Image (spheres, rainbow, N blue to C red):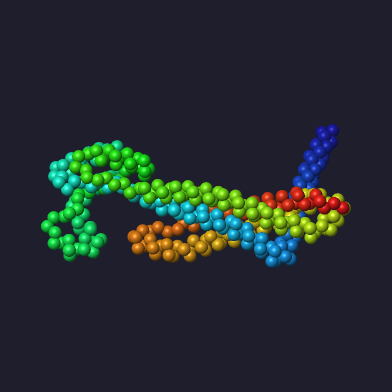
């Protein structure tokens, strides 16, 4: 009796394991079948694009140009922001001391400058140092050597701890009230103009990106519309034999995705090549000013962003075209 119970339990366990294995096999078979179906659809989409090379190439190039233009403007704004940031980091307030100020008065002024809130560093340049630097830079060294006294005033170079123009202006306003200060100069107005231009550039990127994005959608939708019209008879036959809309829609969506991805890839290659080509001249110019500035190319995140946007626009344009024109094809 005990043996029969054990045999029954073993048979039940074996049947349960076999049922699980059968379900697993069916799921795997269904999954591999779907994967094979998608691979076949992708291959057919590539073949359809290759059958119309000129039309496909024109659509891809339109997408590449539409993505490259805002991409180039984005890189320009990003590099200008980097350049502005480098200049901001070295922003200084120049304080010209009165020529009649004594050494004691200069020392007192230096102490006052050091006690100011928001001042990071102070550098003093004497009249003799100013004259020496001017001789080296101006090329009038022999003429200036005849002078008994330097005509240039002592200078304090004050570096604020903040690169904000408003904060530097507040510090300059306090320094102007000190005794023995002849002139305070903050050369940051042009930087404010640069910031305004960068804000305009960012808005222009958005407007240009939206406009060209709509153009990409229309270009892809037009291509997919022509593809649907050329395969009208095939679509009718598929519907007569019971094909679903998702099955009919799939190859057209793949076509849009391929077109968008290829256009984005060409745009990325164009941007990389352009920045690399321009960097040769930019680095030569920067070396003349003893700077190591160079153009920054697309980051990996930017690369993925361009390819992702291009692929998404291609897929979205194809989806719009399919939803609009596929319903008009009836058996």
> Residue 174 at what x, y percent from top left?
27, 38
- Total marks placed: 0
The image shows residue 147, relative to residue 98, as above or below, that is below
Give the image location of residue 25, x and y in percent.
77, 48
Q: Position of residue 67 (x, y in %)?
A: 58, 56
Q: Is residue 29 left or right of residue 183?
A: right
The residue drawn where x is 82% and y is 53% is 329
Depth order, front residue of 94/23: 94
Q: Nearer the viewer, residue 244 or 139?
A: 139
Observer able to see residue 140: yes
Q: Nearer the viewer, residue 77 or 184?
A: 184
In screen coordinates, is 276 left or right of 124? Answer: right
Instruction: Kindly tell me whether residue 10 is visible in this rendering.
Output: no
Residue furthest out toward the left: 148
Which residue occupies 39% across, 49% down?
Answer: 191
The residue that appears at 13% across and 55% down in the rendered structure is 149
- Coordinates of residue 240 in the picture (x, y in percent): 87, 53
In the rendered image of this protein, does residue 49 appear above or below residue 177? below
Looking at the image, which residue is at 75% across and 56% down? Answer: 225
Quarter the N terminus occupies: top right
């Amino acid at each position: 009796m005990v043996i029969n119970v054990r045999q029954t339990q073993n048979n039940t366990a074996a049947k349960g394991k076999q049922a699980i294995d059968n379900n697993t096999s069916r799921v795997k078979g269904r999954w591999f079948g779907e994967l094979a179906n998608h691979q076949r659809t992708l291959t057919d989409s590539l073949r359809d694009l290759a059958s119309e090379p000129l039309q496909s190439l024109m659509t891809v190039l339109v997408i590449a140009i539409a993505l490259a233009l805002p991409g180039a403007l984005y890189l320009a704004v990003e590099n200008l922001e980097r350049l502005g940031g480098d200049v901001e980091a070295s922003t200084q307030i120049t304080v010209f001391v009165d020529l009649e100020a004594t050494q004691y008065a200069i020392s007192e002024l230096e102490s006052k400058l050091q006690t100011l809130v928001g001042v990071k560093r102070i550098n003093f340049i004497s009249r003799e140092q100013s004259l020496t630097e001017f001789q080296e830079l101006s090329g009038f060294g022999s003429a200036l050597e005849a002078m008994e006294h330097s005509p240039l005033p002592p200078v304090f170079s004050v570096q604020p701890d903040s690169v904000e123009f408003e904060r530097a202006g507040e510090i300059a306003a306090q320094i102007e009230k000190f005794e023995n200060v002849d002139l305070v100069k903050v050369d940051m107005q042009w930087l404010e103009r640069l910031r305004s231009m960068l804000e305009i550039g960012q808005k222009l990127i958005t407007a240009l990106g939206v406009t060209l994005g709509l153009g990409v959608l229309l270009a892809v939708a037009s291509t997919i519309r022509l593809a649907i019209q050329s395969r009208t008879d095939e679509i009718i036959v598929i519907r007569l034999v019971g094909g679903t809309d998702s099955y009919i829609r799939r190859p057209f969506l793949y076509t849009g995705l391929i077109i968008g991805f290829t256009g984005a890839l060409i745009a990325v290659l164009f941007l990389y090549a352009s920045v690399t080509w321009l960097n040769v001249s930019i680095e030569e110019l920067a070396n003349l000013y003893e700077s190591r500035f160079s153009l920054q190319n697309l980051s990996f995140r930017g690369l993925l962003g361009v390819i992702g946007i291009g692929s998404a626009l291609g897929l979205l344009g194809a989806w719009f075209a399919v939803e609009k024109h596929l319903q008009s094809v009836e058996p």
